[in-house]
Amino acid sequence: MSALPATAELTFRPLAEPDLPAVLDLLTASLAGGPTGTRTAEFFRWKHRLNPFGASPGLLAETPDGRLAGVRLFLRWQWHEGATGRTVTAVRPVDTATHPDFQGRGVFRRLTLDLLEQVGDQAELVFNTPNGNSLPGYRKMGWQELGQVPVALRPVRPTAFARGVRAALARRPAGPAAPPDCRLPVAEDWFEERSADGPLAELLRERIAADAADPRLAVRRTPEFLRWRYGRAPGLDYRVLTCHRGGELTGLAVGRPRRRGPLAEFTLADVLVRPGDRDSAARLLRSAARESGCDHVATHLSPGTEAAAAALRAGYLRAPRTGMTLAARTPAGPTRRTLADWRFALGDLEVF
């Protein structure tokens, strides 16, 4: 291997469409199959090209003979700031990989810092949820650890759940398991069957109007965003729960059944109800446990929301030793944001 610094022998350039097969191969070799089990061109294009917030900027590191040494992408995102009413443009570092032959030579750092410089005039916030292994590297590049975003759990099958937790804590390998038997409506079909200006749109308009009084950063849930995020996500198997009162749609929840080691988990990504309607929130939370066909439900219930207020009576408790670490910065340096500045749904932070 050359004694030259890695960056001296590599070309760093924007990712282009013809690079996709090699990028998918490198991501698979480095990060396995991702949330769907297989990294496909369809999933990549949905995530990085069809995102309603814009196409993802990406950079490659390439050897003189055209070998891919590393890849880095930033997912575009938008937060609505209730305190000012303005849109806060953001990016989320995702899908990064370095070829084993080039690890430890500064490729990840160079790709990240170059991409930060590239998006400097297009985004005012950079955020992600690094794990314990990657967090130290982010700190060295200027990220600030803002705190833990907690996860709430609702056991559905207590015996199976306790057995699975014990196996996970003991790091016992999980044997082959069938997918969870979830019979909830498939999100893709549900969203495609709804008109652009029907009951769902009315529910979301009421929600947006009420949330304008909340000063925290949040994603505006529009029919177009929900259809992209949950209805058209290839291979993620999102499902829909609804509740009605007098024939009127009063609430919507979206989640996905998945295997988490020895356990079948229903990851509840979004809960949306009419302003102040805690009863509908409780009904949706209970339905997620009752109808998902999983051992437990996992979600994040942001303080001050109807779902958070209904959580205890629906059987949800904050899980100890769980959660996601939120880290952030601006493209130019430190951020003044704190964890309390956000109102998250799990769908905003769930790795996809």
Image (tube, rainbow, N blue to C red):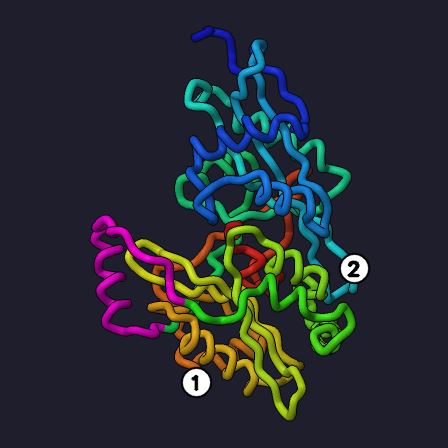
Q: What residue is rendered at 43% in x and 58% in y?
A: 323
Q: Residues within 10 Å of mark 2 (few under 14, many from 20)?
A: few
Residue 15 in sight from this viewpoint: yes
Residue 85, position in %: x, y? Answer: 78, 64
Query: In front: 252, or 170?
Result: 252
Q: Nearer the viewer, mark 2 or mark 1?
A: 1
Residue 153 in sight from this viewpoint: no
**Residue 313 got which mark?**
1
On screen, 56 above or below 205?
above
Q: What residue is rendered at 52% in x and 34% in y?
A: 96
Tell me how far mark 2 sits from mark 1, CA to CA: 35 Å
Left or right of 88 in this view: 240: left
**Residue 349 got which mark?**
none
Amino acid bearing label 1: Arg
Magenta span includes 71: no
Residue 185, position in %: x, y? Answer: 53, 70
Left or right of 154 in this view: 120: right
Amino acid bearing label 2: Arg
Quadrant of the image for the N terminus?
top left
On screen, 270 above or below 57?
below
Left or right of 159 in this view: 268: right
Residue 275, position in %: x, y? Answer: 66, 81
Per the image, label 2 sits on a secondary structure element best described as strand
Q: What residue is rendered at 58% in x and 58% in y?
A: 348
Residue bounds of the magenta highlight:
155-181
Per the image, label 1 sits on a secondary structure element best described as helix
On screen, 210 above or below 60?
below
Q: Which residue is mark 2?
A: 86
Earlier-in-chain disc, 2 versus 1: 2
Residue 230, position in %: x, y? Answer: 59, 60
Query: In front: 9, or 28?
Result: 28
